[in-house]
Amino acid sequence: MRAACNPVTSAVSPYQPGCEVVFSDWLPGALVTYTISYADGTSSTFTGTADANGHLQHAFAVAYQPPAGATHGRPETRVWISVVATSADGAQVKSACLRFAILPRT
């Protein structure tokens, strides 16, 4: 079983292997949902509440292994990270970014 990702260890170099830390700074007190979606159709989601400064971070344990022989930049190595923040008045802000997730096979 994989050890839990530590947000502090995973956010500074050297990074904790197998972890991805996602940060957001916006909408103080907002409900924030992070979703990491992998090329194989699986995903992982976390929901939390931003602090009074709008800050929230979460460390995801990234278990995804691209297919053998996959090279950096190929579609099967891509991971989408989407963030949706909903403020107390119901306003939503959405963002998405693309990460490459080639992990060493062990």
Image (spheres, grey):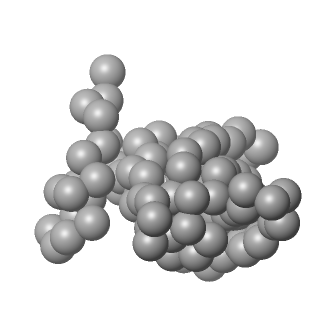
The foreground one among 45 and 18 is 45
Q: Seen from this angle, which residue lies furthest front?
A: 89
- The percent coordinates of residue 82 (x first, y second) are 70, 63
Could you say which quadrant of the image residue 3 lies in? top left
User: Compared with residue 81, is residue 4 higher up or lower down, i.e. above or below?
Assistant: above
Image quarter of the C terminus: top left
Image quarter of the N terminus: top left
Could you say which quadrant of the image residue 46 lies in? top right
Q: Is residue 26 visible from the viewing direction of this image? A: yes
- The percent coordinates of residue 8 (x first, y second) are 21, 57
Answer left or right for 68 relative to 40. left
- The percent coordinates of residue 36 (x first, y second) are 63, 53
In this rendering, the count of numbered labels is: 0
The residue at 54%/50% (across/down) is 49
- The percent coordinates of residue 69 (x first, y second) are 54, 60
Answer left or right for 59 relative to 38. left
The residue at 43%/52% (across/down) is 58
The residue at 63%/58% (across/down) is 30
The residue at 84%/58% (across/down) is 90
Could you say which quadrant of the image residue 20 lies in? bottom left
The foreground one among 8 and 19 is 8
Q: Is residue 101 visible from the viewing direction of this image? A: no
The foreground one among 74 and 15 is 15
